Image (cartoon, helix red, strand yellow):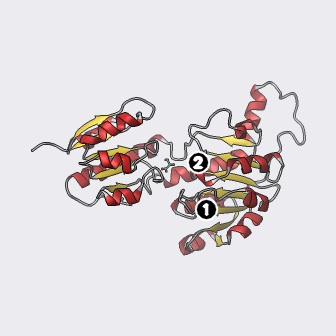
Amino acid sequence: MKKPQVFVTRKLTDEVIAMLEAVATVEQWTEDYPIPRELLLTKVEQADAVLTMLTERIDEELLTRAKHLRIVANMAVGYDNIDLAACKKHGVIVTNTPDVLTEATADLAFALLMATGRRVTEANRFLLNGEWTSWSPMLLAGQNVFGTTLGIIGMGRIGEAVARRAKGFGMRIIYHNRSRRHGAEEETGAEWAGLEALLQESDYVLLLTPLTEETRLLMGEKQFGLMKETAVFINVSRGGTVDEAALYNALVEKKIWAAGLDVFQVEPVPLDNPLLRLPNVVALPHIGSATIQTRTEMAKLAAANIALVLKGEEPLTAI
Ligand code: DGY
């Protein structure tokens, strides 16, 4: 019997490819940039499964071409690159990679929070530019982290993991989420708050919501206007949740103090994005889950989902 075919949209480790080769014939796009759309549309025509990144758009056009497709295994917890309704219509299973990236992403969110509040990248540039001429009382003075208030918008697994870290920093934790998270409330003392109250009370506002029609441009002029002038805004969700022009104005007009951004409206962020020129912006290239161990686990989970579906079994993490 002919083996099923899997198309993998980025180069992954031999271990992951071996997991797929145990059940299928595997082809990979091995360049370190996204596969051109036209080529992807050709490649999926013969595929029974695709292992995708968040850089690939899985939509009606692609699904119409992919006549044999049974599963799209996205190597990310977010899946705003995938049209779920179209997948359902075409009978294609979609899986993501939750849990395995929770702690690494929470670490990065907290690292970005600290780097932004304490002006770490600005201080590093200052030193490298030869500007450090003497110790000075208020030189590169930032905002306290310990003992301040953290507001988390989008309290899922990653939010809860950040809250555990924040508890160790003596922070008061408030969160906004559609549903109450009683476990997190008990474990970390986190309190549910309405969005407005959270924005008004927080010293650090951390955005962790998935990108949906409901959360698109969630943070705009009004929301930044509610924040404290000393507050720091951190986005580790998706760039589409933030009105970047409104964020720029809020920073320039000193309505808020600083921003730490791991995600942008357009990625890779164009270097002429004005946010990148502000000294009080810490910008990272979407590395929330980027540890060797976590990315390896994400790839293995995506491969395991494909192997299960191709054997006619239930995947581990269907959406
Ligand atoms: C995700 O998993 O959605 C991240 O943004 C990439 O790791």
In the image, which disc is placed on residue 108? Answer: 2
Rendered residue at 57%/69% (across/down): 184
Q: CA distance from mark 1 to mark 2?
A: 13 Å
> Can the viewer see residue 148 in this picture?
no
Q: Does 287 sit left or right of 280 as displayed? A: left
Rendered residue at 30%/41% (across/down): 44
Q: Residue furthest right?
A: 137
What percent of the width, then of the height, locates residue 3? 16, 43
For label 1, the SS is helix
| Disc nearer the start of the sequence (1/2) | 2
Rendered residue at 38%/44% (across/down): 52
Q: Is mark 1 within 8 Å of ligand 1?
A: no
For label 2, the SS is helix
Rendered residue at 26%/52% (across/down): 70
Corner quadrant of residue 202: bottom right
In the image, which disc is placed on residue 163? Answer: 1
Residue density around tag 1, few if under 14, some if 14–19, many if 20 or more, within 10 Å: many
What percent of the width, then of the height, locates residue 316? 32, 59
Q: Residue furthest left?
A: 1
